[in-house]
Structure formats: C-alpha cells, structure tokens
Image (spheres, rainbow, N blue to C red):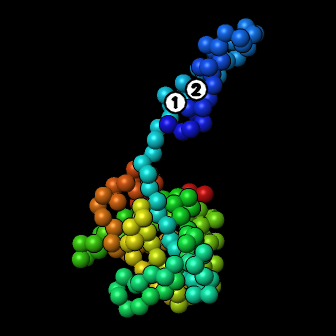
C-alpha cells in the first residue's frame, strides 16, 4: 500500500473520531475517508519489472558515477555507468523470440524519448559496451558497432522463461512484422 494512502487514511480516521473537530468539517473528512478507501480498493499492483541498459564510460568518470565490471566472456574489464541510459520507462512493447540453440531473446520497442537516447548513445559510444540487466540480473554485454535509429533495443539471448512471463505481464507484446500505431 503506498504511503500516501496510508497517511490519508490515518488522518481521515483521526479527524472523524476526534471530539474537538467542529461538525462542519465532518462531511469533508468523511469524503476523504471514502476516497482513500476507493483508492485502496482499486489499486492493482503491477508485477515488479526492471529492464535497464547501461553504457560503458571512460575510467576518468570516477567512482561516484561508474563501477568497474568484468566482461561476461572474461576477456577484460570496463567501467560501467551507474545510471542507466534506457530503462523500462521508455519501453512501449516487446517481441520475444527463441534462437536455434534454444536460448530466448527479445526486441524492446522504445518510445520517442528512448529512441533518441539509444540513437545518441549508439553514435557517441560506438565501439563501447552496452550492458542489459533484467530485474538486476546481468543478461548480456553488447558491443555498440553501428548507429541504432529504429528505436529497437535487443537482448539477443540470455532471458529466462520466467523473465519473459514477467515481461508479458507488464509490457504489451508486439507480434513480429507489425508496425506500431502512432
């Protein structure tokens, strides 16, 4: 339950049962209480999901802004930004797919803001790494090798069936070959 509803509920209850409140405030407080109860009853909690893409940054950015990480393939280390470049807030839809080896990946379709962020990153950080995390789990390291201006961020493999199910519950699925509605 969000804290604002709890506070509103507690304040409304305390005012209604307080003996020194003038009667002219009682209808207003009763309305606040009913409104708080409707908010609580109608609140549907979405499953928690985070999908974040973090970019490699220069070592001189320092500890407050980056952390050194080892590549998943074990071939070296690089500094990773502590602030994601693209997050689930910019994702509007996704399309999961299965690779020939059985691993699962997904295409994430970004809104206008996410498209601009990804395109800017792909131009400015070409040759650097991009790391995808799903619910805090590092899924894949990607090398930025070309400009990405179509607004699609891909995780080519490494997603679990449970993660795909959670993503399906949170983000609308987009069938392959369809174009987004403007």
| Element type at mark 1 | helix
User: Which label sits in the foreground, 2 or 1?
Assistant: 2
Residue at (54, 39) in percent of width and height:
2
Q: Is residue 56 left or right of residue 29?
A: left
Q: Is residue 43 above or below residue 99?
A: above
Residue depicted at x 23% and y 77%: 101
Does residue 180 appear left or right of residue 141 in this picture? right
Which residue lies at the image location 52% right of the left edge and 87% below the top edge? 128
Q: Residue lying furthest left in this view? A: 101
Where residue 125 sits, quadrant-wise, is bottom right
| Residue beneath the point at 58% across and 26% down | 9
Query: Which of the marked residues, 2 or 1, is nearer the chain's N terminus?
Result: 2
Give percent across and percent down for residue 148.
Answer: 55, 79
Residue situated in front as seen by the camera: 101 or 150: 101
Q: Secondary structure at mark 2?
A: helix
- Rounded to the nearest angstrom, the CA distance separating label 2 from label 1 is 10 Å
In the displayed structure, does residue 170 sit left or right of residue 31?
Answer: left
Q: Is residue 97 visible?
A: no
- Give the tally of numbered discs: 2
For residue 135, say whether it is visible: yes
Mark 1 residue crowding within 10 angstroms, few (<14) / some (14–19) / many (20+): some
User: Which quadrant: the C terminus?
Assistant: bottom right
**x and y percentages locating residue 42 in the rendered image:** 50, 31
Q: What residue sits right under mark 1 in the picture? A: 40
Q: Position of residue 118 (x, y in %)?
A: 58, 74
Q: Position of residue 64 (x, y in %)?
A: 60, 75
Residue 9 circle label: 2
Task: Tell me if label 2 and label 1 are in contact, CB under 8 Å.
Answer: yes
């Amino acid at each position: 339950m969000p804290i604002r509803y709890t506070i509103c509920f507690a304040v409304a209850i305390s005012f209604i049962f307080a003996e020194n409140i003038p009667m002219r405030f009682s209808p207003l407080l009763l309305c606040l209480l009913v409104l708080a109860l409707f908010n609580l009853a109608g609140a549907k909690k979405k499953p928690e999901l985070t999908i974040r893409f973090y970019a490699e940054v220069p070592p001189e950015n320092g500890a407050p802004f980056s952390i050194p990480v080892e590549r998943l393939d074990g071939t070296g280390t690089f500094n990773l930004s502590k602030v994601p470049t693209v997050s689930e807030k910019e994702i509007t839809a996704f399309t999961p797919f299965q690779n020939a080896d059985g691993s699962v990946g997904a295409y994430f379709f970004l809104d206008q803001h996410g498209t601009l962020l990804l395109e800017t990153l792909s131009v400015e950080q070409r040759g650097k790494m991009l790391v995808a995390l799903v619910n805090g789990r590092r899924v894949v390291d990607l090398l930025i090798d070309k400009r990405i201006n179509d607004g699609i961020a891909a995780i080519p493999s490494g997603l679990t069936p449970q993660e795909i199910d959670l993503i399906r519950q949170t983000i609308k699925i987009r069938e392959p070959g369809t174009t987004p509605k403007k």
